Amino acid sequence: MRIGADTDGGDLDCPDEIRSTISCCLKATRSERPASFSLDNRVGRVTVSRRVRCSPQLAILALVLSFTLQAATQQIESIPVPGTKAFPESITSTSDGALFVGRLGDGGIVRVKPGTDESSVFVQPGASGSRSILGVFADEASSTLWACSNDLGALGGIATGSDTGSALKGFDLKTGNGKRSVLLPGSHAFCNDITVDARGSVYITDSANPVILKLSPGATTFEVFAEDSAFSPPQGGIGLDGIAFGSDDNLYVTTYTAGEFLRVEVKDGRAGRITTLSGNHHLQFPDALRTLSNNSFLLIEGSGRLDRVVITGGAFAVTPIHDGFVTPTSVTRIGTTAWVSEGQLAFFFDPSKKILSPSLPFRIYAVPLRKEDIK
């Protein structure tokens, strides 16, 4: 049903029986001083004049309109990610509301059209030599979709793609065509997540080594931006993971297995003191970070939760927003909605679960945010 703002019955696009009811009652009240009632909704406001003798019909009409408006404005709660082995690992978005999801199992990057649940493969599996896609980050200033690519063929990852190591890939944000490919240094690197500063430099976390790497604009190789023993992965575990700049212009990272939240002070483009922050909650497998405001972030805990984290001095405070995800892996925000990718990664990494099937289709989920969540 289409309802125009502040309309009378003549602007309602509705069934004939409802239209005739409105017409009858409006005609009956034209010569008399009307009382009125209104029905408000996000898409508009309907005001209908009535007489007492018409109220039963209009009461029914109000209910019909109410239910119809609720259905018409119902938010999309989740969006399926194509691919029986998608295992979505990261998600990012652009200012027009488009979503981009990296696929760890099937490879490639999926794009969801703004404001819809229509998705399609935007970057093809194996494009520019890419393998399993982990972190993705939309850099609109350079019209580049950055992506972390890793060879996970031994675990059942994508077989196509020519890369045998870990690399940062750059794809055109409008076409999906390949633009850049830069290998990470070392033979056992693992590109995990990405952020970009105001100058266009790209920063990535290396989950296999205790380093944050930086790719300056125009550079063809990485430099080590920050290195610290606090970044080191424990034996058999995962080290650095999420990464994002705070509103104080410092860089913040998480360590997945150890569950730490750390700050790297940044001055004149250089790394300074590195601090492990204390918190009011022990983080369980902290993953992706996305900047909010006033030095706060959206944070994913791989144990199943989306949080809001606020930094104050050398400490952080965690407020849970939504729980119950099956290995959530990343988050992005569009307006007052957080979109969370559910990776179900145990079915990919845990050998004991290889014979089991994840819940299909894989999905990303919409989480409404309150004002206090994003301030």
Image (spheres, helix red, strand yellow):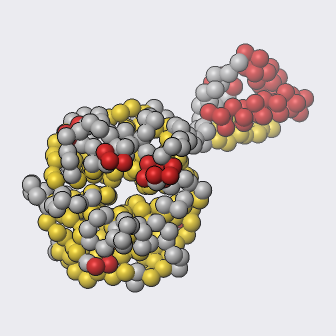
Q: Position of residue 161 (x, y in %)?
A: 23, 39
Using the image, determine if residue 138 lies above or below residue 30.
Answer: below
Q: Residue furthest right?
A: 53
Q: Who's the residue at 36% across and 72% down the image?
A: 234
In the image: residue 231, left or right of residue 257: left
User: In the figure, 79 relative to 343: above or below?
Assistant: above
Q: Position of 333 compared to 272: left or right?
A: right
Q: Position of residue 283 (x, y in %)?
A: 49, 71
**Residue 187 is at least partly visible in this image:** yes
Q: Residue extending furthest top?
A: 16
Q: Residue at x 48, y 79 (%)?
A: 279
Q: Residue at x 32, y 58 (%)?
A: 193
Q: Is residue 279 above or below residue 327?
A: below
The percent position of residue 139, horizontal first and vertical second, equals 26, 51
Q: Quadrant of the N terminus?
A: top right
Residue drawn at x 83%, y 33% is: 59
In the picture, measured across the screen, residue 314 lies left or right of residue 337, that is left
Q: Position of residue 259 (x, y in %)?
A: 44, 72
Name the foreground residue: 136 vs 153. Answer: 153
* Residue 133 seen by the camera: no
Q: Horizontal placement of 113 versus 358: left or right? A: left
The quarter of the displayed image where residue 61 is located: top right
- Between 177 and 337, the one nearer to me in the picture: 177
* Total number of numbered discs in the rendering: 0
